[in-house]
Amino acid sequence: IMAGRTNAQIAEALATLAGIMARDHQPGR
């Protein structure tokens, strides 16, 4: 079981999703 690696991958995926969501919620410039 590679819990550390899995958590890192999940954190990275969440960060990527958060960045995309934040960018999408920006007023269209």
Image: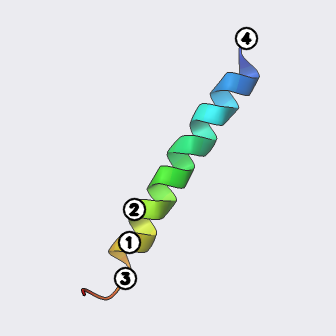
Which amino acid is tagged 2? Ile
Give the quarter of the figure containing the C terminus: bottom left
**22 vs 19: above or below:** below
Q: Alpha-carbon distance for marks 2 and 3?
A: 10 Å
Q: Tell which circle, 2 or 4, labels the residue nearer the N-terminal end.
A: 4
Residue found 65% across the figure and 34% down from its top: 8
Quarter of the rendering containing residue 22? bottom left
Circles 3 and 1 in contact, beta carbons < 8 Å? yes
Quarter of the rendering containing residue 9? top right
Give the quarter of the figure containing the N terminus: top right
Q: Secondary structure at mark 4?
A: loop
Q: Residues within 10 Å of mark 4 (few under 14, many from 20)?
A: few
Q: List the residue tagged with mark 3.
A: 26
Q: List the residue tagged with mark 4.
A: 1
Q: Alpha-carbon distance for marks 4 and 3?
A: 39 Å
Disc assigned to residue 20: 2
Residue found 62% across the figure and 43% down from its top: 11
Q: Secondary structure at mark 3?
A: loop
At which x and y percent is residue 25?
38, 79
Which residue lies most toward the front here?
29
Q: List the residue tagged with mark 1.
A: 23
Which amino acid is tagged 4? Ile
